[in-house]
Image (cartoon, grey):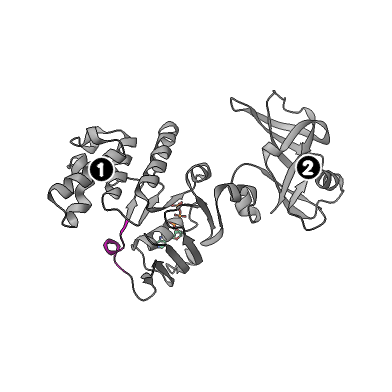
């Protein structure tokens, strides 16, 4: 295994703004990196450059000591020891599950008992040993996705690239597949790069989350870190739920507590810093700041409440008890994070 290094990577298709610019990232050996960002921000382009389907316009890609690509040379995809799983699964309909999984081995000239053992192992890992002789058409969406994963596994790749692999699945199946991905990651030992625009998926699976916007990398950090300490409005708005308040807070501290926030909320002017407030840090009740309930959405275990503060800004909170639209309440903000 070796570390994947992206060094000042860029891709310009010649259509206005470059699809990817100055993108540098070291993917931990055996790590699980989620690449997150809005539609069109360049995630797929980064993945395709890593896989070898696109050549960078600038910068370089290394796997350990090995140069995979730069602007003047590019190792073909089949020489990179990587595997890619697409949203569409890309299975051969006329082949059995076992033949689909074994296909990359056949291409590499593996045959006989070595071939059968690897296919058996890979199918076992994704719990499809009993489905070896079926055709893809006779499987569920989740099972097809698992065949695609098993096909990745047979060649023991250094890096597995996944482009929105769960986008076609319903919510229940998604959760089940997240579990499969986690197991798959642990058993394969490969580094995984997982493109998604679903932040909850990214948070649930990844060891590191990278957020992109307009072709650039904004932040990369473990899920708990990026949730607690996002850098800037875009990352703050994309990761987790919350509201961004603009408040005149003093001092340089980024982690803010109720005393500072209370003073800032009472101030007449609202010029100042962007402060991210998570709904779980907002308590409705007590002697807090005045707010009005804009809406309350019942989510089963709690209500997700949208509030308007006295200064006109929006805040989000959770409530265990029902609140009415238009109700006047008091709120205490336990914590805020200066973006
Ligand atoms: N082959 C191409 N030729 C020209 N422009 C391209 C090409 N591929 C991608 N682009 C452009 O590059 C930008 C980034 O596209 P990319 O597919 O990487 O985004 P993405 O973040 O993966 O989006 P999505 O989440 O919608 O799949 C877009 O503006 C897109 O139109």
The reply to whether the magenta stretch includes residue 80 is: yes
Image quadrant in which the C terminus is located: bottom right
Numbered circle sitting on residue 121: 1
241 over 34 or under it: above or below: above
The reply to whether the magenta stretch includes residue 73 is: no
Residue identifier under label 2: 312
Q: What residue is at 48 percent from the left and 62 percent from the top? A: 26
206 over 25 or under it: above or below: above
Q: Position of residue 100 (x, y in %)?
A: 21, 45
Residue 70 placement, left or right of 119: right
Camera-side mark, 1 or 2: 1
Q: Position of residue 121 (x, y in %)?
A: 25, 43
Residue 120 lies in quadrant: top left
Question: Camera-side residue: 14 or 272?
Answer: 272
* Residue 93 appears in the figure: no
* Magenta stretch, residue numbers: 75-82
């Amino acid at each position: 295994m070796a570390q994947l290094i992206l060094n000042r990577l860029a891709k310009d298709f010649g259509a206005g703004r470059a699809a990817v610019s100055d993108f540098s990232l070291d993917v931990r050996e055996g790590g699980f990196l989620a690449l997150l960002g809005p539609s069109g921000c360049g995630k797929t382009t980064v993945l395709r450059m890593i896989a070898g389907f696109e050549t960078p316009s600038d910068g370089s890609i290394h796997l350990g000591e090995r140069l995979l690509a730069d602007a003047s040379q590019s190792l073909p995809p089949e020489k990179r020891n990587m595997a890619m799983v697409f949203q569409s699964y890309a299975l051969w309909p006329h082949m059995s599950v076992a033949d689909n999984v074994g296909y990359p081995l056949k291409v590499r000239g593996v045959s006989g008992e070595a071939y059968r053992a690897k296919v058996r192992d890979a199918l076992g890992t994704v719990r499809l040993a009993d489905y070896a002789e079926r055709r893809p058409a006779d499987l569920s969406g989740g099972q097809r996705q698992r065949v695609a994963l098993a096909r990745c596994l047979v060649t023991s790749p250094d890096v597995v690239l996944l482009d929105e692999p769960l986008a076609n699945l319903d919510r229940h199946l998604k959760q089940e597949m997240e579990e499969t991905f986690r197991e798959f990651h642990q058993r394969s030992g490969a580094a995984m790069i997982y493109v998604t625009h679903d932040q909850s998926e990214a948070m649930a699976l990844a060891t590191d989350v990278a957020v992109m916007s307009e072709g650039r990398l904004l932040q990369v950090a473990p899920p708990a870190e990026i949730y607690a300490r996002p850098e800037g409005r875009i990352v703050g708005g994309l990761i987790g739920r919350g509201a961004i308040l603009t408040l005149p807070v003093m001092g340089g501290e980024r982690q803010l507590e109720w005393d500072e926030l209370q003073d800032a909320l009472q101030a007449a002017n609202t010029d100042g810093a962007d402060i991210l407030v998570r709904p779980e840090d907002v308590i409705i009740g007590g002697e807090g700041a005045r707010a009005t309930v804009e809406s309350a959405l019942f989510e089963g275990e709690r209500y997700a409440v949208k509030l308007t503060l006295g200064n006109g800004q929006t805040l989000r909170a959770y409530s265990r008890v029902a609140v009415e639209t238009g109700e006047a309440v008091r709120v205490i903000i336990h914590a805020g994070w200066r973006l």
